Image: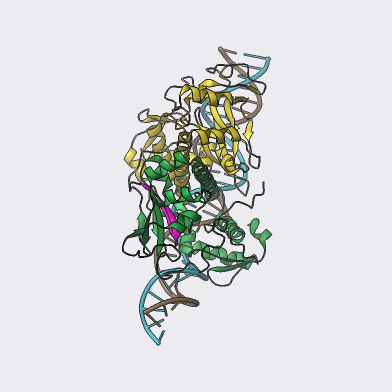
Chain colours: A yellow, B green, C cyan, D brown
Amino acid sequence: MTKRRDNHCLDSKKQHQPDLHNQPHDKHEQACCSDINECSCHGETCIHSKACITRVPIFNHLDDEQLDEIISTTRTAHFKKGDIIYHAGQESDSLYIVSKGRIRIYRLSESGREQLLRILQPGDFTGELALFRRSVHESFAEAMVDTDVCMIVRDDLEKFLMQYPTIALRILNEFSNRLDESEKQAARVATERVETRIALYLLECMENQGTGMEITLPMTRKDLASYLGTTPETISRKLAELETLGYIRQMTSRKIQILDMDGLMIS
Amino acid sequence: MTKRRDNHCLDSKKQHQPDLHNQPHDKHEQACCSDINECSCHGETCIHSKACITRVPIFNHLDDEQLDEIISTTRTAHFKKGDIIYHAGQESDSLYIVSKGRIRIYRLSESGREQLLRILQPGDFTGELALFRRSVHESFAEAMVDTDVCMIVRDDLEKFLMQYPTIALRILNEFSNRLDESEKQAARVATERVETRIALYLLECMENQGTGMEITLPMTRKDLASYLGTTPETISRKLAELETLGYIRQMTSRKIQILDMDGLMIS
DNA sequence: CGACAGGTTGACCGTTATCAAAGATCGTGG
DNA sequence: CCACGATCTTTGATAACGGTCAACCTGTCG
């Protein structure tokens, strides 16, 4: 049962968007909707964006006519760094597709502590949970940098799903992946020690980034801790430990070289 | 953000199957396929079961003709207590719908420890993960008692999904619920102390069972520990502690009376 | 009535959270 | 371009939470 193949590293999507944005996703990149057709957005919403819809995996198999139909029902919105796109308890009525930027999806547990669930990159979507249950959001979505999203409201989406069942299959596929990720993550947090979780995370990053032995962590220690169910201090310490053991080498706080994959695996 | 409403307690499905089986789900109930039309199964598989398909939430909105069409593609199988229905790494090609019995779904983490994900009751289905990803199972399914399942193979299911898109919507809805459960569970294991997780679990049981202040745990300490990411010993200790605090009263090891809901909530 | 699985309790100690403070890094504005 | 402040990261000291191992109960079933 060795299965180093799915994985995600919260930073996945190399497969979806092979070369969408080459610029580093930092903040305040420039204008919004950079590679989107219409562009005047920064107040609240701008008008439909073609590039977004045509590229996302759940729609990109449709033909032009169908795409146009979907695009015509789409709204685009811009969010500034730190903006909350939706929050738990809020009623939901749209699917959000990331066109540009990065979105943090997290939950607050009963005790008020936050757990990071995933980070959305261009091409990823969210909002589904509440959408298909006709219910409220359970999680929070926060723009990590200035971000553009395309939105499809529930009724339109349902219409398309009835009309083009292949879309549903794509979404089912995406849900399956996410469910797998989530269950895997739950199982790890429940059964592995922190050091192991970190090691596994590093290995997943390596596989997803495809940049050889050097990986770039897509987030801060705090977020990583939140994702892995630990604290920033412990992350620091365990990484230092893995370095002492000669398994990794920390170039900067975000750049890490994997020196001994096998060592990591048994950590 | 108080949301005591979804929940499951691993023992959900009161909503799906209001009065399906009144007999306690114990072991060796009697013959198999008790309330199923055909009944000669015990060797390996028996032939199509109508009752199963017509009752499950993902199909029960269809009309008779459509149901018959689905039923005709269905196979039924019987598993004895302890049988493995599928295991991680195995290639998947069917959806399993529980007709009678109980199925444990669990994962093994990298270190070989087991985490219980959920327990399926009649009307629940599984196998989706691998189905929609055209991939292998990530989890194990084990019959907890003698159980009957209906199976639909992938190609048939896909055909129906294309033909009756409402089925896809139902499945999307089910996936959303499961994803919510899984994320919630991950967040809890990652952020709450064991005592809190146990308390929350008890509260969910109460809401789902609708039996007033007295709940019946649907599993052993070992399984509960596996589900909550802890050990049987710790479960014992924490329950004893909650009892000392006057929040609960343990009648037998499976029957627990909730004495102070508010107390539990702040645990 | 005895055996066995399941459950409880105790002693111990390892892992990891917490609190505190010092060091690094990054973005901003002068 | 540099300096400042804010934020992120590291490191240390300490303690508690919960896991482990072992022994002892308890209830269930043959």
Q: Which residues are magenta?
A: B88-106
Give coordinates of residue A29: x percent, y percent.
Answer: 56, 19
Residue A77 lies, with reference to residue B201, above or below; the image says above
Residue B171 lies, with reference to residue B210, above or below; the image says above
Give coordinates of residue D8: x percent, y percent.
Answer: 55, 32
Q: Is residue A185 left or right of residue A5?
A: right
* Picture mark count: 0
Q: Residue furthest front?
A: B65
In the depicted view, which residue is nearer to us: A66 or B266? A66
Give coordinates of residue B195: x percent, y percent.
Answer: 57, 58
**Can you see residue A230?**
no
In the depicted view, which residue is nearer to us: A136 or B53? B53
In the depicted view, which residue is nearer to us: A228 or A75? A75
Q: Residue at x 55, y 24 (%)?
A: A71
- Quarter of the image with the C terminus of chain A in it: top left
Give coordinates of residue B51: x percent, y percent.
Answer: 46, 58
Residue B35 lies, with reference to residue A54, above or below; the image says below
Was residue A186 drawn as part of the magenta stretch in this picture? no
**What is the quadrant of residue B136 in the picture?**
top left
Residue B58 lies, with reference to residue B23, above or below; the image says above
**Can you see residue B135?**
yes
Q: Is residue A212 left or right of residue B162?
A: left
Was residue B92 drawn as part of the magenta stretch in this picture? yes
Q: Residue at x 49, y 56 (%)?
A: B123
In the depicted view, which residue is nearer to us: A267 or C14? A267
